[in-house]
Amino acid sequence: MSTDELAPLHPDATGLTLFRALPNGTGRAYSEVEFTRGRAGVEHFLRQLRAFGYVRNSSADPESGYGVLDVLNAAGDIVQDYEVPTARAHAYIKRKLRLTVRHAPEAEGR
């Protein structure tokens, strides 16, 4: 597999969500989206992201990249993930999929 080729998509893929580890050690999870075309919809969106350079194969280094694009099955379980390399890529995915923050860290001092 060449470096710009994505790992094959999991056969049970039907949706996506984002996760981002924040500098203070907490994380931010986003809402989930299920594609009406199921796996075909996920695959199409991933091809677009790869063409823009907005997604790449996950790294073993947790400090690598800006966030994680989780691939979900019909039950909402994470079956695969890809690395989101930049803030720009993260913002694009969030906007295109209309994702909202599902879990944000608690504000300190409250």
Image (cartoon, helix red, strand yellow):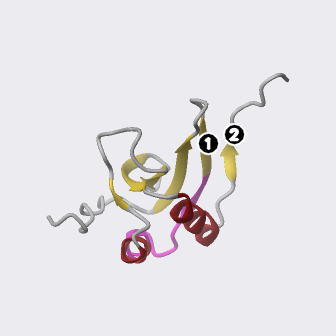
Magenta highlight range: 31-44
Q: Which residue is mark 2?
A: 104
In the rendered picture of this protein, how many numbered marks are placed on residues?
A: 2
The question of residue 93 being in magenta is answered with no
Residue drawn 66% across the image and 66% down it: 98
The question of residue 41 being in magenta is answered with yes
Q: Position of residue 26 (x, y in %)?
A: 60, 32
Residue drawn 40% across the image and 63% down it: 55
Q: Position of residue 73 (x, y in %)?
A: 42, 54
C-alpha span from label 1 to label 2: 5 Å
* Viewport quadrant of the C terminus: top right
Give, as a three-letter code, the residue at label 2: Ala
Residue at the far right in the pictured view: 110
Residue drawn 31% across the image and 46% down it: 59
Q: Position of residue 44 (x, y in %)?
A: 40, 77
Q: Judging from the image, what secondary structure is the residue with disc 2 in?
A: loop
Say the numbered circle drawn on residue 28. 1
> Label 2 near label 1: C-beta < 8 Å?
yes
